[in-house]
Amino acid sequence: MKFIAESSVYKYILKMALPAIAGLSTQMVVSLVDTAMVGRLPDAEYSLAAMGLGVLATWAVVSFFSSLATGTHVLIARRFGSKDYDGCGDVLNTSLIISFIAGVLVGALIVGLSFPIAHFFAADDIVGEYAGDYLFYRFMGLPFFLLSVSYRGFFFGIGKTKIFMFSGILVNFLNIVFNYIFIFGAFGFDGMGLAGAGLGSSLATFFDALFYLGISSLSYYRKRYNYFVNFRFVKDFARSIIKISLPVSFQNVFILIGFLSFVAITGIIGTLEQAASQVVISSLMISLMPCFGFGIAVQTLVGNQLGSGKFAIAKFYGFETSKVASLYTIFIGMIFIFAPRIILILITNDTNVIETAVPILRIAGFGQIFYAVGVVLANGLQAMGQTFFVMVAEVISNWVIFVPLAYLLGIVFDLGLIGAWSALPFYVIVYSAIVFYRFSFVKESKVLKV
């Protein structure tokens, strides 16, 4: 591969990855700001508890359906690589129709059942009422969010990751502004408390969908991909999108359940230990978000090359992207290991929590070094259509190894928090090794034809 193994390759990878990383990073900022706003309400204890339930429920549904971006991304990247631009437009239209129908149906269901759902999970009636208000307004925006997901997959597939960056900046800025207005009251609007956070987020997703619609209306995209002229629903593309996306949806659910189980295990060890674990999980986002950005880049790079019939070059881009991402995780890992307090003090000023978190952040810092290989090459396999394999790899490493080992070391062997967190490197290394092996030896005949 000497004919493409040069500095321009890495520039191309970074050109794809950095805007995606920037767009993802804005989500961390808005999450912190939202929590800070709600934490300043008069009844902050109830509001924060309710927000925790509401955000968790939202994340569970959103992570399940946001996999539509993966299916759309993979199909678009293949067609873009083969220069089938009308096909790209057909995939986008099909994805938009699926997203809108799913968003309306699921959104209406959860809006209608928001209070029963909230009270089922809340031990306190006040918390349940607040969480119900949040879910009621938050899921009104689900159709617009899923439309944005489809557009996101389209622009990822054609290599325009900067569009996602601008979208991320816009939607999260609006999220902060609207949340402030509706949480506390401003510009003639009465303060709604936590319900205002749900309404503000839904309005932000509405404007995000308008942003994508506006960008897609530009003549460059409109004339090249003909999605307005040839607006139609293609059943074959719909089946391919669902076939690729569904395993990713279940993988996201499995990850959520696995980590909730792990957090519950740390809670058995102690409240302080559970708080320290939450802080470390938040710290890991510094490393994981860029990995997800590199994953987006590799799906585009691998998909484009597969679309143009260059299987060997597709694998080459997968490995090279994983190398670049690993350099980043090694750098961050060294900070986690040798200067953990610098990271922890950014998240909390509680001395007891910080000191409890120091040793486990060092353990996590070692484990996450290997995570880049797993995330990047897993996205490469997804670009090949092997989403079911990636899901199975996650289930094996998370449910069969990570959670049971954490319980065994932390609770059964009474090694406490350090024992429980020692399971993390095993999980990461096993997952990355499985994915690396599969990506290394996968044959062109195993690539899903879409």
Image: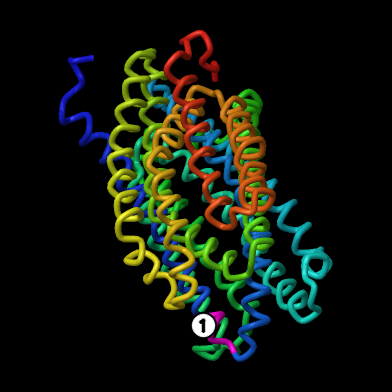
Can you give x and y, in whole percent of width and height, for residue 377 in the image?
43, 29
Type of secondary structure dominating the magenta stretch: loop
Task: For the C terminus, give its image quadrant.
Answer: top right
In this orientation, which residue lies closer to the viewer: 402 or 55?
402
Residue 101 covered by magenta stretch: no
Name the residue located 64 percent from the left edge and 32 percent from the top edge: 242
Would residue 284 be found to the left or right of residue 264 on screen?
left
Range of magenta residues: 37-41
Q: Which residue is mark 1?
A: 181
Q: Is residue 144 above or below residue 137?
A: above
Q: Secondary structure at mark 1?
A: helix
Task: For the N terminus, give its image quadrant.
Answer: top left
Name the residue located 55 percent from the left edge and 17 percent from the top edge: 448
Can you give x and y, in whole percent of width and height, for residue 26 in the image?
40, 61
In this orientation, which residue lies closer to the viewer: 305 or 324?
324
Would residue 304 be found to the left or right of residue 238 on screen?
left
Q: Say what amino acid the circle numbered 1 marks.
A: Ile
Name the residue located 56 percent from the left edge and 80 percent from the top edge: 38
